[in-house]
Image: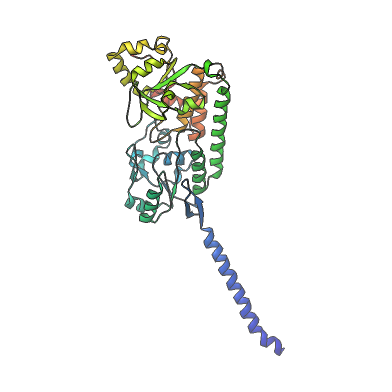
Amino acid sequence: MKFIKRFLPIMLIFMLALTGCSQTSDEGKKEEATTKTVTDILGREVEIPSESDSIIALGAGALRMVCYMQGTDKVVGVENLESETDIARPYSYVYPELSKLPVVGEGGSNGSVAYQEEIIKAEPDVIIAAYDKDMAEDLTKKTGIPVVTVSYDGIFDENMDKSLKLIGEVIGKQDRADELVTYMDELEKDLNDRTKDIADEDKPTVYTGAVSFRGEHGFEGTYAKYPPFDAINAKNVVDETKKSGALLIDLEKVSTWDPDIIFLNPTNMKLVNEDYKKNPDFYNSLSAVENKKVYSQPSYNWYTTNVEIAIADAYYAGTIIYPEQFKDVKVEEKADEIYEKFLGKKLYSDFVKEGLGFGPITIGE
């Protein structure tokens, strides 16, 4: 009995100590569970909340990817560019509520500028940004909010896959990221499989004109290594320049190439038609014009690539350039399938209403 009385206090102290250690350990685990570390597109390790209830997306394409990821309910601020909706930026058209959110930055062709005070007021858990390292780290330093960088270029881009998965980690939608990446892989394979075995000598030559980049351009606005053409292994005459990306080309060069098929951005047809009035001989001398092989190719670039438009463009171009290989494709249905997968809504009829549908074009009308 004396033994028990003597050692009971010691045992109680020991048990309390164990309980305290256990509580401390549990509290530590809970504290650890409130954050996680992600590696962003620049290879930076960024500590973010385990669950992010509010975000801001800054820079070219960042908000678009959030829309693809069905994360708009978490967005608490937008760049001034997003204050207006436009079918040519389909994500803004499908999610018009974004235009009513507080403006927390400036975006557009001149680059992105963050409004730091407005960002702090919006209190996002995380900022998703198409920024470089210095911009990202400076923004975190001045706002105290973690910045996760993302980026992509064109279509079927590896960085797009990585960025979607990053956004999935941030907003808790990893399954949606996997769904989109798998879908894009399937489309890329389908387009390539239909065309990869066609010999170059059996391919018609093609040209895309009236391409918008840093503003509107007429027939001379074109694109080397044009992603929708590359996706279907098309023979783009502009690739002979050995350049890549949007550029202005001398019309005499186009005359020399004399492409078999021409695709034009319908948005800029007023510029093409104005030039036609001044220089009808040039246009009428082109085989594609003479043979009525001029078709629409709605622009997909606005604050970088609208991926869904670009892929739909590739399918339409495929039906024109390789009618046999794409004979099973109903372009309107395929376009709607793509729009719905990316943005949850069939949009082809909306594009048609705005004069942005697929079809033949007559220059000069």
Of the 4 image quadrants, the one containing the N terminus is: bottom right
Residue 142 placement (x, y as % from top left) = 35, 55
Q: Residue at x 36, y 28 (%)?
A: 247
Q: Residue at x 56, y 42 (%)?
A: 175
Residue 227 placement (x, y as % from top left) = 46, 29
| Residue reaching furthest to the bottom | 2
Q: How is the rendered protein coloured?
A: rainbow
Q: Residue at x 28, y 14 (%)?
A: 277
Residue 334 placement (x, y as % from top left) = 52, 25
Residue 226 placement (x, y as % from top left) = 44, 27
Of the 4 image quadrants, the one containing the C terminus is: top left
> Left or right of 324: which side holds 298?
left
Q: Nearer the viewer, residue 218 or 203?
A: 203
Q: Residue at x 34, y 17 (%)?
A: 252
Residue 365 visible in the snapshot: no
Q: Is residue 329 above or below residue 16?
A: above
Numbered label tally: 0
Q: Quadrant of residue 212?
A: top left
Residue 152 visible in the snapshot: yes
Q: Nearer the viewer, residue 96 or 126?
A: 126
> Left or right of 57: which side holds 217?
left
| Residue reaching furthest to the right | 1
Q: Quadrant of residue 275?
A: top left
Q: Quadrant of residue 328?
A: top right
Q: Nearer the viewer, residue 173 or 215?
A: 215
